[in-house]
Image (tube, helix red, strand yellow):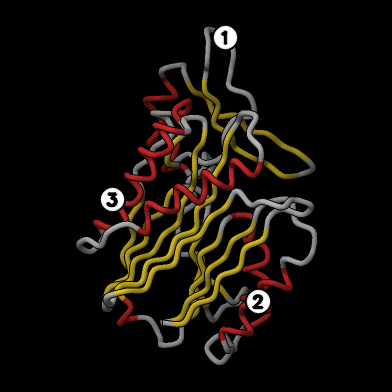
Amino acid sequence: MEYVACTSPRSGEEFSEDASVIIEEGGIFLAAVIDTHHRDSYTREQASAVAQATAKAFRDGAEAPRARLLSALERADQFLLRYHPDFGAVVTAVEVRGTDMYVAQLGDSRLYRDARNSSGYRLLTPIHTAQNLNEIARMEPALLSGKFQVRVESHEGRVTHRLYARRWWKFWHRGGLVPTRSIGNTVYRPALSSQAEILTINLAQVPSQTLFTLCSDGAQATVERMYKRLHPHHRLVQMEEVRLMLEQGLVFEHDDDATAICFRL
């Protein structure tokens, strides 16, 4: 297994609200990207500490296939609900055992792989936002209760679907929330689900030297540019070159924390 990781706080900030985990032991490879969010007055240093504490859940214990991912998510969820109820976190995590790769998806972080198409990549994970019609269908009972609503907002030509929660009789929670699945964040439940969507990838059917990338949404543009730049030579490039491309891409100003893990079997 070859892998590199790259992280960068948003421009002008010292601390990142992202966290990452990489574990390779006993024939198991586990990697996760965690992107926290909150709606109250926390410093970025506090948010960074919460992200790192949440990531710790993924480092504890080794269990049966898929169970490690699910138990890690449950531990992280309970940690946030108990100690930081105003925080939430989206997660994309992978667990590789033999020829199987299990993917746990919660929210709008991502898993990519290289592809022989014009963009040079394929997005493997669904994005859990209210733009996803499956998520709207899942949230229907909560939306019909009158305690939650989805608003479509536009800013500088960018359309965003946000989930809002009613906090009192007529006041809606400030700012809204883009992800519709997340660990933690008591205010938006049960419309906000903590149940991960689990995907299984048979690696025996994947070409050798395939380049996979986990990333938070803040690294999305950099990762997609990297794949396009590498196309069609993904499987020839050295991982050190991949790391340099990620770092160079994040040198430019970016308005969100960015974390990416690239790995190759």
Q: Label 1, label 2: how many angstroms apart (C-alpha)?
A: 48 Å
Q: Residue 85 got which mark?
A: none
Query: Which of the two labelled residues, at mark 1 and mark 3, occupies the earlier sequence position?
Result: 3
Element under disc 2: helix
Name the residue beneath numbered marker 1: 170
Residues at badges 2 and 3 in contact (C-beta under 8 Å)?
no
Name the residue beneath numbered marker 3: 71
Query: Circle 1: is it few (<14), some (14-19), or many (20+) Cα within 10 Å?
Result: few
Give the label, 1 or 3, closer to the camera.
3
What amino acid type is highlighted by mark number 2? Lys
Q: Could you tell me residue 209's position as x and y percent? A: 45, 87
Query: Which of the two labelled residues, at mark 2 and mark 3, occupies the earlier sequence position?
Result: 3
Q: Image check: 124 left or right of 251?
A: left
What amino acid type is highlighted by mark number 3? Ser
In the image, residue 216 above or below residue 137: below
Q: Could you tell me residue 166's position as x and y percent? A: 52, 17
Residue at the extreme left: 64
Element under disc 1: loop
Between 33 and 115, the one nearer to me in the picture: 33
Q: Residue at x 55, y 61 (%)?
A: 215
Q: Image check: 167 left or right of 79?
A: right
